[in-house]
Amino acid sequence: MLNRAKRFIETNKLKVTLKFRQNYHLMPSVGWMNDPNGAIWIEGQFHLFYQFHPYSSVWGPMHWGHACSLDGIKWQETAVALAPDQIYDQGGCFSGTSLHENGVTYLMYTGTAGSAGDAQPSRQVQCLAESTDLLRFNKSEKNPVIGGNNLDESINPLEFRDPKIFKREGHYFALIVSQTEEGTGQLILYKSVNLEDWHFFSILLEGTGEFGTMWECPDYFEIDGRDVLLFSPINMPRQAEKYTNYASSVYMVGKVDWETGKFYVSHYDEIDQGLDFYAPQTFATSEGYVLTAWMHMWERTNVTAELNHGWSGCMVLPRCLSIVGDQLIQTPLPAIYDYYHPLSIDLSSIDSDYSDSLEPQGIIRINGKAEISFKTIISNHSQEEICVTYEADKQQVTFSRAGLKQKIIGQENHQVSSRSYCMGTNKRKVITLEIFLDSSSVEIFINEGEGVMSSRIYPQESLCNLLIKK
């Protein structure tokens, strides 16, 4: 089946329409892409696996695609790593993570036992594969390694997926999402000494209704002496301008009690307040932790699929992570500046409106006084535009794609053409915006990574005009 997927990709490349193809964001050569999986940094090289359906540009039986990069910006697609070719994963090889040690790379993923499209829900189990060359992955003869006879009674086997594997003090842990009897999310810890024989360890964290109906794609890491959890809740209730998407992504800063296997939360917040961001996952690199995520949103218009372009989905620009106080700070991976130099604009030294021409993709950096509002309009010759507005009295940044002809509709009971980021009550002297513009996306880093807004856009022609109205 892996060879079949490879042949299909090779023979269908010419069917892909180039319009909306990205310049510096990872995307599939053909077919559907969603969640990043198995993000790992090995001997100076980034490897990113991802949910992949090579046979069409809509979601289908999941495979694991694989791309690698020397700098995290320019990626090379390699062989498909996993395909649903066993009884325990015939419904799809769902999301998971990776671990590398002693020259071996291990992938842990969720297998679905039923076939795609079955009327009855599929039992979800955790499976293991390994490789010594990062090209050919062999599935364990003990699969499924979690989900057969080692399920705790607290776990719903129909909602039990997305394992995050890591090693701590000589033991392996698998952090897996599940759903409570009350219909809320929870994080389960399993423990092992050899990656194949696992036992239930604890319920690390249990959610309430304020955190939605189900959690997906958990991640755990330690940074600057703090324990950090990432996960993506579905149907999380809106809090003012936060959590307005059908599915959100949340970080929690706190402390794990490793004796009891419980996580104690000191702070949580939304990771990205754009319109298209989901399933973040981190790399541990020599420079620290780097985050990536799927730049799309469930239950929304799939533009390139509806236009029969032969592909769908991309990843965000990778981001370096740090913690300041309890706040997660995200800054662009520095390698991006080796390819694009920002157009820098200091509004403090400009008395009137500012205009300029733009490259079809690139970076715009704006500095302004925090007490002065401004509106940034990026347009094309077809009179389409996107807008980034800063309102000083609200300390709020708003992104809008309402000025584009290609409309996007979502399941939400409100419009999905704009979102706002509120900076809080901290007094500032300046406001900084760094806008990363690509063929079909825009990412806005606010105040050196204090906030980020990531969204997909589909202009009919390149956005090439910049106007800043003071």
Image: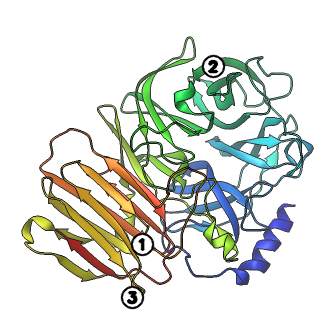
Disc 1 residue type (three-letter): Gly
Q: Residue under circle 1?
A: 403
Estimate how packed mark 2 is, as few (under 14), some (14 to 19) or many (20 or more) residues with alpha carbons within 10 Å: many
* Residue 280 visible in rendering: yes
Q: Give the left or right position of residue 359, taking residue 373 as reference.
A: right
Q: Give the left or right position of residue 423, taking residue 3 as reference.
A: left
Q: Are marks 1 and 3 in contact (CB under 8 Å)?
A: no
Q: Quadrant of the C terminus?
A: bottom left
Q: Residue under circle 2?
A: 203
- Nearer to us in this view, 168 or 346: 346
- Measuring from the top left, give residue 318's x and y in whole percent: 46, 56
Instruction: For marks 1 and 3, give the one nearer the viewer.
Output: 1
C-alpha span from label 1 to label 3: 13 Å
C-alpha span from label 2 to label 1: 46 Å
- Nearer to us in this view, 315 or 273: 273
Mark closer to the chain start, 2 or 3: 2
- Nearer to us in this view, 284 or 350: 350
Name the residue: 50% across, 71% down.
440
Mark closer to the chain start, 1 or 3: 3
Disc 3 residue type (three-letter): His
C-alpha span from label 2 to label 3: 55 Å
Name the residue: 71% across, 84% down.
14
Q: Residue furthest right?
A: 87
Disc 2 residue type (three-letter): Ile
Q: Residue under circle 3?
A: 381
Q: Is residue 461 above or below residue 79?
A: below
Mark closer to the chain start, 2 or 1: 2
Instruction: For marks 2 and 3, give the one nearer the viewer.
Output: 3
- Measuring from the top left, give residue 123's x and y in whole percent: 84, 35
